[in-house]
Image (tube, grey):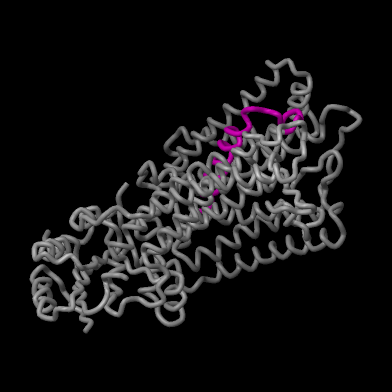
Amino acid sequence: MSFNLSYSKTDRDLTQTLNKPKKWWYVAVTLLGLGVAWGAGSWLHQILTGIGVAGKNNPVGWYLYITTFVFWVGIAHSGTLISAILFLFRVKWRSAVYRSAEAVTVFGLATAGLFPLLHMGRVWVFYWTLPYPQMGGLFPNFRSPLVWDVFAITTYLTVSTIFFITGMVPDVAIVRDKAKGWRKKLYGFLAQGWQGTDNQWRHYTQAYVFLAALATPLVVSVHSIVSWDFAMSIVPGWHSTIFAPYFVAGAIHSGLAMVILILMPMRNAFRLKEYITDHHLESLAKFLLFTASMVGFAYIIEVFIAWYSHNPWEQAIFSYRAFGDFKWAFWALFICNLAFPQLFWFKRFRRSTFTLALVSVAVTIGMFFERFVIIATSLAHEYIPFMWGLPDLTFTEMGIVVGSFSWFFFLFMIFAKTLPVVSMWEVKEQQEPPKANT
Amino acid sequence: MSKYKGRNIMAVFPAMDVLIDGIKQLQAAGHENFLVYSPLPHHEVERALKRPKSPVRVFTLVGALTGFCTGWGLTIYSVTSYPLIVGGKPLISMPPFGVLAYILTILFGALATMLGFLINARLPQLRLAAEYDERISNDHYGIQIFTEDTALLTKFEKVMVKAGAIDIKKKK
């Protein structure tokens, strides 16, 4: 994939995304702000009243908060896949889409990171999770997957933010050189004095390769560690050796759907069809079809192993998932995550805006259901019938979940109007450099 | 102390091929004290300049090894300083501690890479060079030649114009 454009046109087209916002942007940001306010108000209510206002209970102690946490960590994964792994494999089509995908990673993690806090009964002592000697010199239990999770998520957020910012420095310098007045000062500050000398590029390109190489194993490890929050326990439906690859595949599946969902309106609103082309969306759709096959394989193996193991509790939980209280979510996840993406076997569906949007929305919903089914059903239907029970869905919990979606899109909207959404220097790299002797 | 300081001229080029000509002519004249500005990294420019490999990789390696040792060190120290058997597992449990060592290897490696980049690229800089040309980030190129010899600078100015420079900025 190469662009038949000039350097000047690229800079002009890709910096116009930072022009004064239109009315629709203000309307969207206001609505999302209201959603964030609803979420924040719900959290405040929960802090003042007590964790009981959330729908989780005994036995379902992990419910919508942990479901949403796992969902957002999953959403974050495709960004690193597109920006780091495809970079190391020198996949050219990534250059136009990776910046937005990276933003999805950073904002997805900024949203996910809130949920362990939201889930805490006493959030004001959140620092007890940090690795320091607490009462009597006792450290947190480093054998606990929950402590690994604290390390994994904070590391992932730190590394992806460094990668995101580093990738943006040369582009911010372009904006600085085009801007005037206070904007020049602001972008001058953000560009850190970047001038594009050969020395700067030499160190930059090497740092970028190493950051990509360091971020790549995180794609595999972070969601594996999240999956071990479940798999390390002995709860039926959770205690499984396939959970790590199963969660990683699901994470990339949902993340790709979210990236497609964000790129489509963005390329229309900012008139970026020359840069984010049908070919880009089609490539993402093919990728989505591939990840659908991976999660499909995991779903089938999971059910097969439950039957093949002759383990009555394992069989009972899968029977409960398919025919019990949450059967609607179980069958919906199969339809959304497996059936809908099959449309992408056909080129005309991969090229159709409607189908792309439909499948991406279906997969996003389906992946939320997948996490919900794994988490809620296993706890609701553990070993002893005496301990079986169902959670409640409360207004507070719903407010926080809606607030998290609003928060993610709110951050993205602010990003889209303040920083370049497409990497200018990497798009230029796909073009012929200006030549005087032609 | 940076060798890119003092009296200099900045030659601005409209295209990459003439920039390479300019670099080659400077090298032919035996002058190596110059910086090349470009809107993006080009292999052609790298090949012409023959600069040494960036030392950022050393920062990455040292950072990653520090993280690896910190991961093992922190976890082993924590259980030996307050021995407490949890869940019947050995005090020093290698698999879970390995997870933390793995994560800290990546974290420290990434932080050190960022630091290495900033130190080596001399960033952040509060002010841009006075001779910096704003067209460079868009589609122009530049060669900044440093020497205290004014006669040599005048000579290089002519060489650059002959090579195809469209603009010369001077710092006295």
In-image side of B108 versus A362 (left or right): left
The count of marks equals 0
Is residue B159 shown above or below A47? below
Q: What is the x, y in percent for residue A333?
A: 65, 35
Q: Is residue A146 visible?
A: no
Residue B139 highlighted magenta (yes or no)? no
Q: Residue furthest front?
A: B81
Q: Is residue A389 visible?
A: yes
Q: What is the x, y in percent for residue A82?
A: 46, 46
In-front residue for pair A357/A254:
A254
In-image side of B134 versus A392 (left or right): left
In-front residue for pair A240/B50:
B50
Q: Residue furthest right?
A: A386
Is residue A240 shown above or below A10? above
Q: Residue at x 73, y 26 (%)?
A: A318
Q: Main secondary structure of the magenta part?
A: helix
Span shown in magenta: A233-262
Q: Residue at x 77, y 31 (%)?
A: B88
Q: What is the x, y in percent for residue A292?
A: 54, 34
In-image side of A345 versus B38 (left or right): right
In-image side of B127 versus B98 (left or right): left
- Rendered-image quadrant of the C terminus of chain A: bottom left
Q: Residue at x 88, y 33 (%)?
A: A387
Q: What is the x, y in percent for residue A70?
A: 66, 44
Q: Residue furthest bottom?
A: B172
Is residue B4 shown above or below A144? below
Quarter location, residue A5: bottom left
Residue A249 highlighted magenta (yes or no)? yes
Q: Residue at x 42, y 70 (%)?
A: B124
Quarter location, residue A42: bottom right
